[in-house]
Amino acid sequence: GASTMSADRCRRVAGGGARLRRMDRLRPRYNLGPQGYVPVVTGGPIGKHDAGGEKPPCSTDAGCVEREVHAMKWGLVPSFAKDPAEFDVFKGGASTFNARVEGLESSGLWRRLLDKRRCVVLFDGFYEWKTVGKHKVPMFIRNHDAFLGHAILPAASSGAPGMSQAADSKSTGSHQNKPVLLVETTDVSQATENLPGSDMQGPRHAPLMMAGLFDTWKPKKESGAAEVEGEGENVLETATILTMESDGTPIFAIHDRTPVFLTPETAAMWLDSSRTYKQVISPVLRAAQTHANTLLIYEVAPLVSNIRNESCDCILPKKDYDARKFSAGLGKFFSNKTPAIPGSEAPETKAPPPKRPPEAEVG
């Protein structure tokens, strides 16, 4: 996927008052794969979320819950793992960057995280490959420019009524049930910008919020050694993204799975650890399917299929990319127009591209 938001932008998405942790590891990425760092929002200090542990302080008071934004590795390493390499898909380990929502409660890997280790994973957008004949055509999926869900709503108190289906529908606004497949456009040629006010880099459109689970892995303490602190360099904070069936959404024409998308309302519900997984999952899934019907989907250039290509051209609509390549090449001999800015094209890579891992089947 693409993830270009600055730490300040991520803080705003989390609600404005969130604490930032390890965000120096985050870099703008236009072709991010598993094992890369992604911005992740949690509902409070990580140490308070351990299964069976202490609840976050003031978890029933809307004014007391402190959200945090972390740079976590995409691909969950469970706390009980003997070696993180066991869960590195590129090293032959288990594939844990996605988790199927249908199997969460029956899997010991995921079940222990459902009530206290829920998170929201942020992306500008993500890629999927559509099968057309014998070819795989890359598509980019993101929010419409007009979608106004730029930030997660404040935490709800335990005495407040639950998020209703009406609230979920409200968050999807005027695009509800109006999917658009983008074929020609010029409004996304400028992928990111520095928004007024500060270091607010990121896409002009609202980021995708995806339901996730996270965990913290620490090296085993050797006999007589001091306890490993939560901020130690060897401590791993990792996350997975939940997926659901895409049937009934435009994504089904591309892939049979889709991330569990969150709206500003359901993201707040998902982060609320005072509510159990069983209490929140049904409204979250209903809203996710509704939101999936509002997304912008368009074809991009094949260069994104090589994970080494990190140019911002990765997210350009293919027509715009082809026009840019033409104007920078053969087209400059037939036009007096100013050529494309040097360095804007994606570098060509002769080495064979690394294989993208298949979708996780764990759980």
Image (cartoon, rainbow, N blue to C red):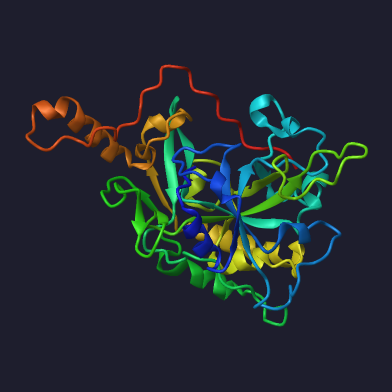
Total residue callouts: 0
**In screen coordinates, is 90 left or right of 313?**
right
Q: Is residue 13 above or below residue 220?
A: below
Could you tell me which residue is drawn at 75 percent across and 50 percent down? 230
Q: Nearer the viewer, residue 205 or 42?
A: 42
Q: Is residue 4 above or below residue 219?
A: below
Q: Quadrant of residue 278?
A: bottom right
Q: Nearer the viewer, residue 197 or 39?
A: 197
**In screen coordinates, is 301 left or right of 356?**
left
Residue 246 visible within the image: no
Give the image location of residue 207, x and y in percent. 47, 56
Q: Is residue 313 above or below residue 290?
A: above
Q: Nearer the viewer, residue 246 or 243?
A: 243
Could you tell me which residue is drawn at 75 percent across and 43 percent down? 363
Residue 78 visible within the image: yes
Give the image location of residue 239, x and y in percent. 66, 47
Residue at the extreme bottom: 159
Q: Nearer the viewer, residue 144 or 8?
A: 8
Q: Quadrant of residue 133?
A: top left
Give the image location of residue 329, x and y in percent. 19, 26
Residue at the extreme right: 223
Give the image location of residue 22, x and y in percent. 61, 50
